[in-house]
Image: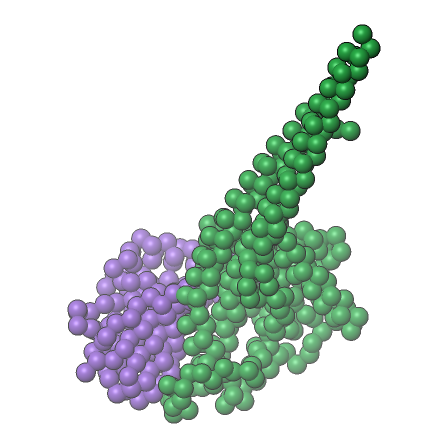
Chain colours: A purple, B green
Amino acid sequence: MTMQFELVTPEASQAQIEATMVVVPGAEGDMGVLQDHAPTVTSLRPGVVSVTGSDGETGFFVAGGFAEITAARCVILAESATPLSDLTAEAAQAAMTEAKAALETATSDGEKNAAERKVAVADAMVDAAKA
Amino acid sequence: MASLKDLRDRIGSVKNTRKITSAMKMVAAAKLRRAQDQAEASRPYAERMERMLSDLASRSSSDLPLMAGTGKSDTHLIILGTADRGLCGGFNANLVKETRRMTNELQSAGKQVKIYCIGKKGAQALNREFGDLIVKRVEDLDKPALSYSKAGAIADDILTMFDDGAFDAATLIYARFQSAIAQIVTRQQLIPFAVEADEDAANVDEADDSAYEFEPSEDAILAELLPRNVGVQVFKALLENAASEQGARMTAMDNATRNAGEMIDKLTLLYNRSRQASITKELIEIVSGAEAL
């Protein structure tokens, strides 16, 4: 009872795992995906994608993106993905400081929106690093 | 006529030039391979994105500005991608020429033009003519390596400008890599998003995607997908450009190496002839000197 899990970023295909279950941080709440899921496309909020495969659970932090789910596969399109094991609290904190600084210096509406997005990503990153 | 010593020095210097150009050619070949690998690795993401996007775009009647435009087309942004360095044949010149042509076209149609320069060479070449149109210059993207986050930062910058109403339409100009000999200068409309007609519908294995459910909603996903697509397109263009640049440099340096070789042959021939001539002259002098006695 497995399906093909794939994590694709613009630079490379980061992971391909035979998974029994995948939990994705959907825009409207976390979503557990098993085999034979109804075909779904969902956007992701920044958070942790966790994959249960034959060799245990693997987690990836994604800064938003999309999940394309069919009966036999679950494909995550993410702009950037970091394995949880590589994510440190210091790096997350640094991202947070940087994002907040960007928000403070933002002048136009467009810049503000971009900075607010960054803060949200950094916030989720800090949470993920703690867990 | 040049003396024998002059000729000898000349041959030596051309030989050095040949060494340099052939080294540059080999470096370019190695970099080209790396650039191609990078382009290859980025393909799955771009393809999936494109499929999702064109699927959504065809069924949605959304009037998002990124999709439908701002309703006017007064100001155009030209995003020009060039190399940071020269010595790559006509690569930079061709891109700049296309930009100049497009700017003139738009200006004669009474539109405003802004230019976003990625790469040192484009900005340098356009500076004199269109310096006041250049809104931004980005340089040294490939130091130490081209990455998606750099392309994403450019895309964010462009989107921020778009949100602030700085332009109505954006076009990317870059060189599509075909082979080391041929790079095709391409104009690609970036904003508003153009649904491509030549969808290569080769992905038959997932032909059932009309049955997808969308969460939260089709329009919400589209609204998120469109800005990301800008990043992906910019990244794709930069990767193509990087491969094209190295390909063009490889070809140019190959030619230069060959020309240097030909020049060395010619100079060597000339050198041997003059040496022979001077020996003959000395002999004649000795012989006629002996006869005079």
**As drawn, which residue projects farthest toward the bottom?**
B211
Quarter holding residue B196: bottom right
Which quarter of the rendering shows the C terminus of chain B? top right
Q: Where is residue B148 shown, x and y percent of the image?
A: 45, 62
Is residue B149 placed above or below B86 in the rendered structure? below
State whether residue B30 appears in this view.
yes
Residue that appears at 27% across and 62% down: A84
Is residue B98 placed above or below B202 in the rendered structure? above
Q: Nearer the viewer, residue A97 or B172?
A: B172
Q: Where is residue A79 shown, x and y percent of the image?
A: 41, 67
Q: Where is residue B59 shown, x and y percent of the image?
A: 50, 90
Residue that appears at 64% across and 40% down: B265
Left or right side of A122 for B98? right
Which quarter of the rendering shows the N terminus of chain B? top right
Left or right side of A13 for B196? right
**As drawn, which residue projects farthest toward the right?**
B292
Residue that appears at 75% across and 15% down: B286
Is residue A87 placed above or below B45 in the rendered structure? above
Left or right side of A4 for B104? right
State whether residue A113 appears in this view.
no
Quarter holding residue B268: top right
